[in-house]
Amino acid sequence: MDVSRIRVLRGPNLWSRHTAIEAIVSCTEAERAIEGIAGFEVRLRARFPHIGFLQPAGEAKAVSMAHALEAATLGLQSQAGCPVTFSRTVPTVETGVYQVIVEYSEEAVGRLAFELARELCLAAAEDKPFDLADALARLRELDEDVRLGPSTGSIVTAALKRGIPFRRLTDGSMVQFGWGSRQKRIQAAETSDTSAIAESIAQDKELTKMLLHAAGVPVPNGRVVETVEDAWAAAQEIGAPVVIKPRDGNQGKGVAVNISTQAQVTAAFNAAVKISDEIIVERYMPGHDYRLLVIGKHLVAAARRDPPQVIGDGVHTIRQLVDKVNSDPLRGEGHATSLTKIRFDDIALATLTKQNYDAESIPPQGARIVLRNNANLSTGGTATDVTDDVHPELAARAIAAAQMVGLDICGVDIVCNSVHKPLEEQEGGVVEVNAAPGLRMHLTPSYGKGRAVGDAIISTMFADGDDARIPVVAVAGTNGKTTTVRLITHLLAQKGLRVGMTNTDGVYIDKQRIDTGDCSGPRSARNVLFHPDVDAAVLETARGGVLREGLGFDRCNVAVVTNIGMGDHLGLSYISTVEDLAVVKRVIVENVAPTGYAVLNAADPMVSSMAQSCPGAIIFFALDPQHPIMATQRAQGHRVVFRDGNDIVAAQGDQEYRLALGNIPLTRGGTIGFQVENTMASVAAVWALNLDWEIVRAGLRTFISDVGTAPGRFNMFDYRGATLIADYGHNPDAINALVKAVESIPAKRRSVVISGAGDRRDIDIRQQTEILGDAFDEVVLYQDQCQRGRADGEVLALLRQGLVNARRTTETKEVFGEFLAIDTALASLKEGDLCLILIDQIEEALEHIAKRVAEG
C-alpha cells in the first residue's frame, strides 16, 4: 500500500461539509481484496478491537487495504475522544488506486491518526505488534495540546449555535468571529471590546483597590512594599494575619494568605518577589473565596473556590496522597481539563509547615490537609457553583467593581463568609479584579451545575439575531466566471458597499488590488473574509481550489453557476468527465445558506440539475423564457431571469423588472450573447441580495468591459481602422462563444492569434483550432510561455492538427512568443479587418496591445 498524496480539506468539499484528510492510496493486486490475505482482518481486529466495519453498509464491492486504512484512521480518532463520524473510500479510474477521505476535528490529530493507521495496517499485514495504548495516548496528548481550551471552546460553541462563523488565527486561543466589517476577535476571555487600559488597571492591584474604594466597593486595607523588611513593617501596621501577593500577578502565582509570623512573611515575600518587584501586603479577610463572573453589566456566574487539599488515610504520606489526587484524569497540567493538578511547590510546603506537617508526614484517617491557602483552580483548587445564591446587593458590588475598572468580561474575587448577604454586613470585600478570567470553574464546576458563560459572552459581543456575516456570493462555472464576478462586484459597490473580490486576476478590496495572480482559491477567499474593510464578498471559486482544499467559507448567500463545459482541466485530479466536473462545481450550491439562493443556468442540464442539491431557493436564468425549466419555475411563482427582445427581464409570477440591453454596454446592445448571459447571472445574484432595481440599472449602465474594468474579457481596440479583440478564452466552449460574438461584428477579413495550455487534454487543444479554422481566414499560432509539462513544439503540433480540415482558414503562421505573434497578426491587418487575440499573459499582453494601438 502506497500513499502518494495527502490533502487537507479545510472547508466544505467534494465529499462532505466536514474538514477532512484526503489521501491517494495505491494497493497491490493482493491488497485490493483483503479477504484474500490470510488472517489479515483477524490480526487487524486483534490489534484494534474497536476498528468497526471495514465496508460501508449496502456496498458489495471487495474490501481493499484502502478501506482498512480508512476505518483505522477514523476509529483511532474516535477512540482518542475526537468527535469524528465521516469517512469514505472511493476507487479512481486507475485500477488499484483509491481516494481515502477521513474527517478530522484537529488537523494535526487527523494527520497523526492517518500515519498511525498506516502503521496499524502494516503491522496486521506483517503480523507484527502494534502498541494501541501508546497510539491512543499520543493522539489524546496531541489533541489536548492543539484543541481550544475550555474557556475559548465554550465561546466558540456558543457562536456556532448562533450560526456565527469562526476561525482560529493562531495555534493558541485567538479566534475571529464573523467576516469582514462585522468581525470581532477574542483571545481566551478577552474580546475586541476589552480595553487595554482596563486590562492594565486590573493587573495593577494597588490601582484597582484605589478605584474600587472610590466607588464605594469594600476592599481590604494594605499597601505596596519593595523589601522584606518593609513587608514585615506593613504586616505589623495592618495587623496580622495578612495576605502577601505580587502587585501584577495572575492565576494565584506567588500569593500567600493568612500570614502572621515574621518567618512566614519572609517566606511569602521571597515567593512573591519572583513574580513582581513590587509586593502588596494587605489585611487578611477570613471567610470563603468566591469568584463572581461579570459579563457586560450582568452577573452571570458565581463559584466558591476551595484550596487544594487531600484527606489523610493513616497509610500514605502527603506526597503520595497528592500524587494520587493528581492521577485523576480530570486533572491536567494546564487549562484543557476541568481540574488542574495540585502544585507541590515551596508555597505548598510552607502551608504544610503551618499545620505541623511536611511532605513525608502520614496524616491520620480523615484529616483535612490544605496545600495552599488561596483557592485558584490553576493551582489545584476546586469550585462549587453558587450562582443562584448570590444576594442582589453583593452582585451589584461585583458589577460596580467591573464597571469601575472598565472590563467587559471580569472575574471579581470576593472574600466573605456567605454570598447570601451583602458584603457590608459581614466585613467581606473585593480582593481582586481579573481581566481574561478563566471560565472553567463556571463551565464544569467540581460541584453544582455549569453555567452557559460562553453564550453570555457571545450575546454581549453580538446583538440578538446578528450572525456577524456579510453577504457572500460564490461564482463557479467553465466560462464567464470572472466577468460575472466583476459585474456583481460593480453592482454591489453602487450601493456604497465596500466589496471584496477574488478572481483569476487577483484580490480586490474596495476596487484596490491587494494581491495578484490567480486568486480564485480558498486562501484568497479567506483573506477577503478576514479583511476588516469588506462589507460584501464576491468570490470566484475555481475547481482546483475546491479539490485542493475545499471552500474558503462555510456557506454563502448566493451561489452562481454559469455553465459546465468541456476542456475545463478534465483529466486532472481524477476529474475525467463533464459529470465529474459538475459534481465539483456543485459544491458551492450544496453550501448555500437555507435563506440564500442558487443562481443556475436553466439551459445547461448539468447546471440546472444542481437545483435539487441546494438548501436554499433557486433563480434560473436562460436566454429563452419558454425553456421548460424556466416556464415551470415561473409558473410556480419562483424567480427567473431571461431575455425578451431588447430587454433582460427578472420575473417572479406576474411581477417583472425590465432592463434595456441598449443601456448595458457590456452586451453591445445585446449582440454579444455570452455577455448577455453573464449579465443575467449577475442580475439574478444581486436580486437574491435584494439590491434596489434603480441601483442595478445605474450599475449596468456604468460597467464597461475595458482593460481597466475587466482585463482580458472581450476588450476591444481600434487599430488603424481594424478591430482588435483581446480575450482570455482558453477552452473549446469559450472559443465557441467568442466565435458567435465575433460573427456579429462586421469585418472584411478575420484573423486570430492563439496558443494552447499544456495542462489540457490533447483533444481539447485540437478542438480549439478546429472551431477557429471554420471562422477565421488567418490563424497565427504561438508557443505559450509555460508549456505546463509539455515538450517544446508539442502544443503547436496539436493546434496544427486541429486546422487540417479547416473550412475557412487559408493562411497559418507559427511564431515563438506571444508578443511576436501579436505583432505578426497586426502587421497584416487592413482597415475593416478584425483580429481576435487569445492572450495568455493578460496584463503584459494587454499592455503590449495598448502600446501598439498608441503607436498607430
Image (cartoon, helix red, strand yellow):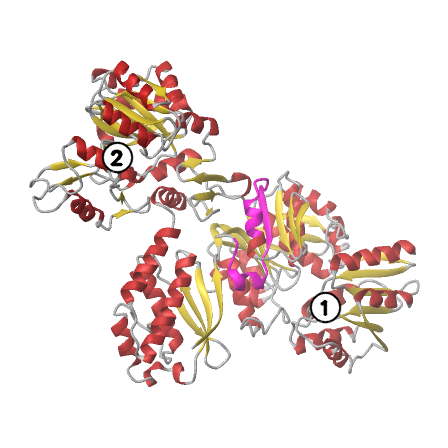
**Residue at which label 2 appears:** 347
Q: Residue at x 24, y 38 (%)?
A: 381
Q: Nearer the viewer, residue 110 or 201?
A: 201
Residue 201 image point, x, y percent? 42, 25
Q: Residue at x 28, y 30 (%)?
A: 291
Q: Which mark is residue 735?
A: 1
Front-lying residue, 292 or 373:
373
* x, y percent for residue 724: 84, 61
> Which range of residues does the magenta coloring cover?
525-552
> Against 84, is 733 above or below?
below
For residue 82, what is the image quadrant? bottom left
Camera-side residue of 361 and 131: 361
In terms of secondary structure, where does tag 2 sit?
Answer: helix
Image quarter (top left, top right, bottom left or bottom right) of the C terminus:
bottom right
Mark pair 2, 1: CA separation: 79 Å
Q: Please state, as top left, top right, bottom left or bottom right, where the N terminus lies in the image.
A: bottom left
Assess whether residue 549 is covered by the magenta stretch. Answer: yes
